[in-house]
Image (cartoon, rainbow, N blue to C red):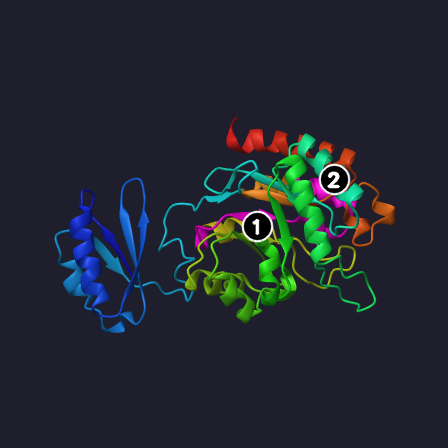
Amino acid sequence: MITVLKKGTSDAQMQTLIDWLAGQNIEVHISRGSELIVLGLIGDTSKVDMELIESLDIVESVKRVSEPFKQCSRKFHPEDSVIEIGSEGTNKVKIGGGHFAVIAGPCSIESEEQVLCVANAVKAAGATLLRGGAFKPRTSPYDFQGLKADGIELLLEAKKATGMPIVTEIMNANHLPLFEDVDVIQVGARNMQNFELLKELGKIDKPILLKRGLAATMKEFLMSAEYIMAGGNEKIILCERGIRTYETYTRNTLDLSAVPMLHELSHLPVVVDPSHATGVKSLVAPMAQAAVACGCDGLMIEVHNDPPHALCDGAQSLTPEQFADTMGRVEKIRRVVEGI
């Protein structure tokens, strides 16, 4: 249930209503817009008297939210969420609400030389966050699984050297102590419905990049985000990374319709990963441009200094030169879309 307060409502008047609702075991989520204040009522609202609330002088309207994802819903939070990223020693980055970010780097951290080379290159080309895999979920148990804790240490060294906030994937909640200095924790497609992991991530105060599952509907995707938000962490970035279809020429099928649909349903920022979505490096640039054209809040692109010898996903990784060219193309589309 959501309650929209009239313009001019004082904090004292609002608090009186919130206290009354709390007495009925209803939690209240406050969303302040430029014009209105929206109160999201969370809990068993079936016994709440809608007509009584609607009759209050400070209340503009009251309505029930039919979607099962409450806190993710744009009805609860009409204005776009802006996620702030960065820690001491890094550049501050915002994403959402008109702020555009580019996350770039190797699929897997392989060596200090590799990650520093790529980090400096993507920063020079305009990337705002550095990605790199330390823990790698692989379909085959015989494939490279990542450097794990050592990989995070190398990524942290690149962070110090470049000032770029870092993004890396978590596989297990037991690994959370290793992620203390990581700026954004990524939940991969295979873990999108690892609900115990999502619950633990809901308890921390750190941005979470949540990737859509290989066969997940948008409703299921948002329900996974709801798990994190229900725990108290509202710093969530949604990532469309392609879904599994019957097509075999591409690794997955990039569902660009998800970008405007998710924006319609939710206030959370949406980024697109054209690298995993296609699995083909020649398709990364055109799909990145298409993603920007349909209104994404950012991109996530894999870059490697020597793709033919990459230990993971070399076929979809751009060279630093190709990434720089892609960034130039993306910027042209952004200028058209945003009317710069």
Q: In this view, does 123 lie above or below 72?
A: above
Q: In which image quadrant can residue 25 be found?
A: bottom left
Rendering coords of residue 145 (x, y %): 77, 62
Residue 66 seen: yes
**Amino acid type of the residue that numbered disc 2 sits on in the rendered structure:** Leu
Magenta stretch, main secondary structure class: helix
Rendering coords of residue 75 (x, y %): 36, 55
In percent of the image, x 30 and y 72: which residue is there? 44
Between marks 2 and 1 in the image, the one whose residue lies nearer the viewer: 2
N-terminal label among 2 and 1: 2
Q: Quadrant of the N terminus?
A: bottom left
In percent of the image, x 56 and y 67: which residue is there? 197
Rendering coords of residue 39 (x, y %): 28, 55
Q: Is residue 122 above or below residue 179?
A: above
**Amino acid type of the residue that numbered disc 1 sits on in the rendered structure:** Val
Magenta-span inclusion, residue 41: no
Q: How crowded is mark 2: few (under 14 residues within 10 Å), some or many (20 or more)?
A: some
Dot 1: what SS?
strand
Pick the front one: 104 or 201: 201
In percent of the image, x 68 and y 43: which residue is there? 157
Q: How many labels does the image show?
A: 2
Which span of residues is magenta-colored? 264-288
Residue under numbered circle 2: 116
Tell me how far mark 2 sits from mark 1, CA to CA. Answer: 19 Å
Residue 214 seen: no
Residue under numbered circle 1: 184
Rendering coords of residue 297 (x, y %): 54, 43
* In this picture, residue 141 sits left or right of residue 175: right
* In this picture, residue 197 sits left or right of residue 9: right
In percent of the image, x 73 and y 37: which residue is there? 323
Q: How crowded is mark 1: few (under 14 residues within 10 Å), some or many (20 or more)?
A: many
Pick the front one: 113 or 317: 113
